[in-house]
Amino acid sequence: MERSKKPAAIPVSPLLPTPQVLMSEDNSRVTANLPTGERVEVLLYGATVISWKSANGKENLFLSSKAHLDGSKPVRGGIPLVFPVFGPPNKNHATGQLPQHGFARNSRWEYLGKTSSESSTLPNSSGDSSVKLDFGLSKSMIDKTNWPYEFALTYSVTLSPKDLETTLVVRNTGTSNYDFQTLFHTYLQIDDISQITVSGLEKASFKDKVQGGDAEAAGEPISIGSEVDRVYNAPSEQAITITENGEARFEITRDMLSDVVVWNPWIEKAKGMADFGPEDGYKSMICVEAGSVSTWNNLEAGDAWEGGQRIKALS
Ligand SMILES: O=P(O)(O)OC[C@H]1O[C@H](O)[C@H](O)[C@@H](O)[C@@H]1O
């Protein structure tokens, strides 16, 4: 008689830690967590990144305590996306009927899905996972843009242990060429604006929106003690470093984005914004905004443009 055999043990491979991506119950936002502890949260309204935390729990983005997250107004904080015009549009331009900073930040985007790169058990692997979240916006998803062109935007937010990357692809899906500007309006969270310096823009000339007019390169790192609103023209190969108390906190590298806006509203302008809080919140934020805004990008029918930034949280 045959004796019953114990089933052979199936070799169990060690469970690989994978990034976790969740859509909120109300379908308003997507959250991704890495096994190493980093976390990012993206609101479908504007595809606005509203939180980016390092593994130690430190929040890297400033979000106003009075920000509207219900889709009634562009978000004051995080990373609103500017497209297809930066600032108040010139009434004589094709973007003339659009709101300040365009329509991307106040349109609801579609979540297209995630791409995870999972950690590996191979000896040479760093053991780190990352995750890319993709969002889409096209002409048909927008009610009244007052902008007569066809487009398909893909916005990708990639979270990895050391950095956050945002990339925009603009496709001209129509038959006419058009001009656009774009910018990642990043609100960085800092502890004390009086201890901040921004370096990497020393050789860049800029447009000073507070004093008015164009200014020559300052030759030294920027420090902030009053309202600052400047559009720097700086080759995208140049990295920007934000230092606090002498310690590097953030490094921003760019691709195809040759402008950098540095903005802090300071006391009076902050008070004048109904959605800005707390009242002294201007002390704990600085906007360093990588973009392409000082000229127009002309996109021919059928063509695509891609640009992006990578922000490293260094402390
Ligand atoms: O109030 P918003 O439309 O969000 O704009 C906020 C700020 O965006 C940019 O940084 C501009 O350079 C500023 O001039 C503007 O005040």
Image: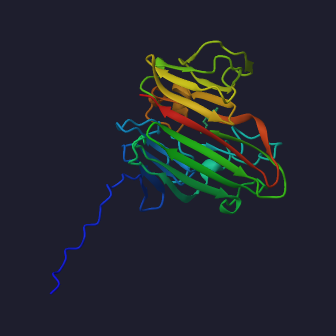
Q: Residue furthest front?
A: 1
Q: Who is closer to the viewer here, 291 or 62?
A: 291
Residue 76 place in picture, x, y as percent: 53, 41
Image position of 259 (left or right of 8):
right
What residue is at 43 percent from the left and 55 percent from the top?
Answer: 21
Q: Where in the image, quadrant-wise, is ligand 1 located?
A: top right
Instruction: Indicate the quadrant where residue 123 lies.
Output: top left
Instruction: Indicate the quadrant where residue 220 lies.
Output: top right
What residue is at 75 percent from the left and 48 percent from the top?
Answer: 97
Residue 134 place in picture, x, y as percent: 56, 54
Residue 18 place in picture, x, y as percent: 39, 53
Give the quarter of the figure containing the N terminus. Answer: bottom left
What residue is at 56 percent from the left and 31 percent from the top?
Answer: 252
Q: Who is closer to the viewer here, 239 or 277?
A: 239
**36 in relation to 242, above or below:** below
What residue is at 63 percent from the left and 53 percent from the top?
Answer: 154
Q: Residue furthest top?
A: 219
